[in-house]
Image (cartoon, rainbow, N blue to C red):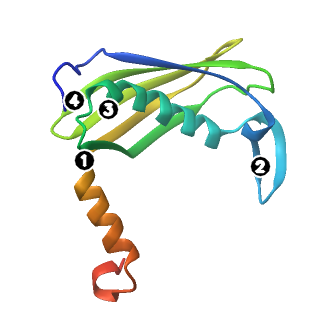
Amino acid sequence: MKAGLSEGYSAELEILVEPSMFAGFDGKIIHNLYSTSALVYHMEWAARKTILPFLDEQEEGMGCRVNVEHKMPAPEGSRIKLIARVTDVHTNKVECQVEAFGPHGQIARGSVTQAIVEKSWLAEKLRELTTGPDEEKHSLV
């Protein structure tokens, strides 16, 4: 990583809640509100924005941990502002606290941890996972 990323560095993301972000399963909308899955996606995106200026050309970031408390609903048309603030940078991990605010205050808070990896390492792992079955290599047991 390039020098400069430190505790307190922040990035923001603003989104407008639209129907594609509603809570739903198996093609059925459960309710016309901002879903937790969409929230997690946006939290990861906001956190990613904190690392982008500091990645070397041969590096990539990968989400490896998300913790979220979805505290308040947000209907269609709500403008949501997410703020990701770096709370720890250690070895190859960057942790951010992320807060999301809607028209009536905080709607969520949580954390996102990203691992910084070499693109060559990532390409090799992808190759290993997609070159066919190797029971010993890929067994989860």
101 is higher (above) or lower (below) than 138: above
59 is higher (above) or lower (below) than 130: above
- Disc 2 designates what residue? 24
* Disc 4 from disc 2: Cα separation: 35 Å
Contact flag, marks 3 and 4 (Cβ < 8 Å):
yes
Residue at image point 25% right, 42% down:
59
First along the sequence among labels 3 and 1: 3
Residue type beneath disc 1:
Val
Contact flag, marks 4 and 2 (Cβ < 8 Å):
no
1 vs 4, front mark = 1
- Disc 1 designates what residue? 117
Question: What is the quadrant of residue 70 in the picture?
Answer: top right
Q: Where is residue 23 in the image (x, y as percent from the top left)?
A: 75, 43
- Disc 4 designates what residue? 89
* Disc 3 from disc 4: Cα separation: 6 Å
Contact flag, marks 2 and 3 (Cβ < 8 Å):
no
Q: Which of 118 and 43 is in front in this view?
A: 118
Query: The N terminus appears in which quarter of the rendering?
Result: top left
Question: What is the quadrant of residue 39 in the picture?
Answer: top right
Q: How many marks are shown on the rendered structure?
A: 4
Element at badge 3?
strand
First along the sequence among labels 2 and 3: 2
Contact flag, marks 1 and 2 (Cβ < 8 Å):
no
Residue type beneath disc 3:
Glu
User: With 93 as the anchor, is 99 left or right in this view?
Assistant: right
Q: What label sits on residue 95 in the rendered view?
A: 3
Q: Position of residue 110 (x, y in %)?
A: 47, 30
